[in-house]
Structures are given as structure tokens and as C-alpha cells.
Image: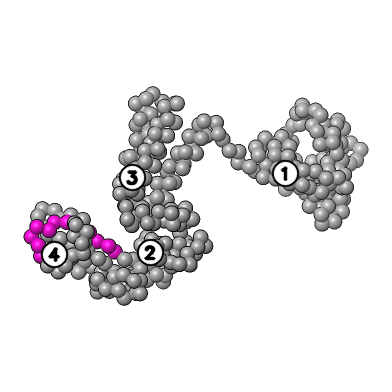
Amino acid sequence: MKAEDGERPRIVESAFLNHQLRAAFLTGEERQGSGAPDVWWFRPDGRKMTQADWSRGDAFALGAFLNGAEIPTLAPDGEPVADDFDHLHHTLFAHDSSWLDGGGSKSFWRPLAYQGYYGLLHGVIVAHPAWITALHLALYAVCVWLLYDIARRHLPGPAAAVVASFPLLLESSRALVLVPVHFVDLGLIVFSVVAWRLAEAGHCYTYGLAGAGPRLPLLLSAAAARGLPIERVARVAAENPARAFGHYPAKGALAPGSDADIVIFDPDGEAVLPGDGFGDGTGDSVYAGLATRGRIRAVLLRGQLIVSDGVLTDDRRPGRYLPAAGGAA
């Protein structure tokens, strides 16, 4: 920090003297067993300040090391106050550190990305902080360039440059670049932009949810594994939904006058679910490659064969939307 208008750094100490925590914190002593005092004051040359340095007339700048592990006051929830020094201290000196210890915080879990960043670069953070600044600047530059590359596909060059400058206009930009702890926030911006750029280039990832296609094979397989009667499964999968929507017995029954929508199931067969969800349009299925008990041999739609031995034989779509009948649940 730097004094203004010729004021000496003692005004900073005076402000701390009036703070409600001054009696218990910023004493220059170690009281909580952290291995370091709660505060160290430094001269511009990096040496610790002496009492005489506070009275020097040519001293207009100072540095401070604040040790959060020495804060005696508890947070509103009763937990110890934790700051980023706790994590750095833990990473540097803890001999039993692991990915499952929350990063050494006493009050909240550190994100794994945060732990990995500190675990990999803690030595650089302490010995070469300028390198961290250079790393963050490089990540910021990548982010801006990728944004420009995305925007210029849709906008004129000058407009794309304005869009790409958005990260530079953030109020927190200086902190994102200079403070190691803000790697997580900076990483969120950078990796979001990278994902956006990959999507623009056509490297899209499907969302991997299963639609209607795999549901019946999964239900039939689970029922077979548990020994449930096939009649009960038919009621659950066909009759009950038809009744709920008011379409029974046109749907959900094998009876004269019904629509003859029939699934022929072989309980002794085996099948492996495909990755396309049986063409239901939902993208990659989360059940791709799953082995199921039983096999759907054929499907008839209103008496017409459309699936034979698991292969779609008629790709026409003669189905129509049927709204729920009046009074149906």
C-alpha cells in the first residue's frame, strides 16, 4: 500500500488501532499456534519494518502479511474464520495433505481445481509471484483472443473486438490477474470460452440423456432380473398409462378393436443397448453399451411390422399425437 498526499504510513497503523479487532488481532504475535504472527509489516525493500521505520519521513509505502490462521474471532456460524492463507499454509507445510481433506480449511471445502492449482504452484506463488501474474495474463489473453475469434464469425471486425474486450472491462480484472486465489474465477471464464469456441467449431457434446427408446428394454430387463411376472410389467408399461390418459382399451390391451400396438419380447434373449437411444433423437445415451436381460424381437404398430430382431424395418412415422381424453388423470 502507498500513502497519499505526503501522509506517512503511520496513518495505516492508526486506522487499525481503531478497528474492533485490534485488541485481539494484528498484534504482531502468534497466539493461535499457526507458526507465524498474525501480521508482518514490510518495507519496500522486502525487510520487516522496525519501530524506527514507522517514524521515517521518507517512508511512503509498506507491505503487509496477514495471517488468517491467527484470527481468534469466530464467524457468525460459529466456525473459525478461514482465508486463503490457510490453504497456502496447509499446502506448504501439511504432511498429511490429501484431495479429501477440504484443502485444510476449517470451515468450508476448497474446490478440487483450487486444491490442484495450489498443490502444483504453491512454490511459485511464494517464490515468484510475478510468474503467477504472467500465467494469469496469458490465460486472459487466450480468453480475449478466443472471444474475438468467436465474435468475428458473426460480427464485423471492430464489433468483434468490442465483444472480445468484455473480460478486460470487468471491475475485478486486476484481481483476477494479480491474485493467485482468483485462479478459480479466471479459470471459469477461460474454460467457458474454450467450450464455446469448441462448440462453434462443431465439436459439440450431446447431453447424454435417455429418451423413450431405452425405457422399455430397461424396464423389461429389470423385471426379468427380479423375477416379476410379465403380466405385471405389461400393466405398468402399457395398460396403466393408457388408462391414465383415457385411451384404454384402444391402447394398452390385446383385445378385439384395440390398435394392435404389440411388442414381442424374448425373456431368454440378451441385448446390448445402442448409443443412439434407438433413434429417439436424444443424442448419446447414458445407457450405451449396457447389457440387458431379455430381447425385444419385434414391434408391430397397428398390426404392421416395424421392428424385426432389433432392426427398424419401416422408418415411416405414421403415428399421431393423442391428447388425454376428457376426465383422464
Circle 4 SS class? helix
Say which residue label 4 marks: 53
- Residue 65 position within the rendered picture, expressed as x and y whole percent measured from the top left: 27, 62
Q: Nearer the viewer, residue 222 or 327?
A: 222
Label 3 vs 1, first from the N-terminus: 3
Residue 89: mark in rendering: 2
Q: How is the image coloured?
A: one colour
| Quadrant in which the N terminus appears | bottom left
Mark pair 3, 4: CA separation: 32 Å
Circle 3 SS class? helix
Q: Quarter of the image holding residue 27?
A: bottom left
Q: Amino acid at mark 2?
A: His
Compared with 3, 69 (above or below) is below
- Residue 19 position within the rendered picture, expressed as x and y whole percent measured from the top left: 23, 68
Say which residue label 1 marks: 289
Circle 2 SS class? helix
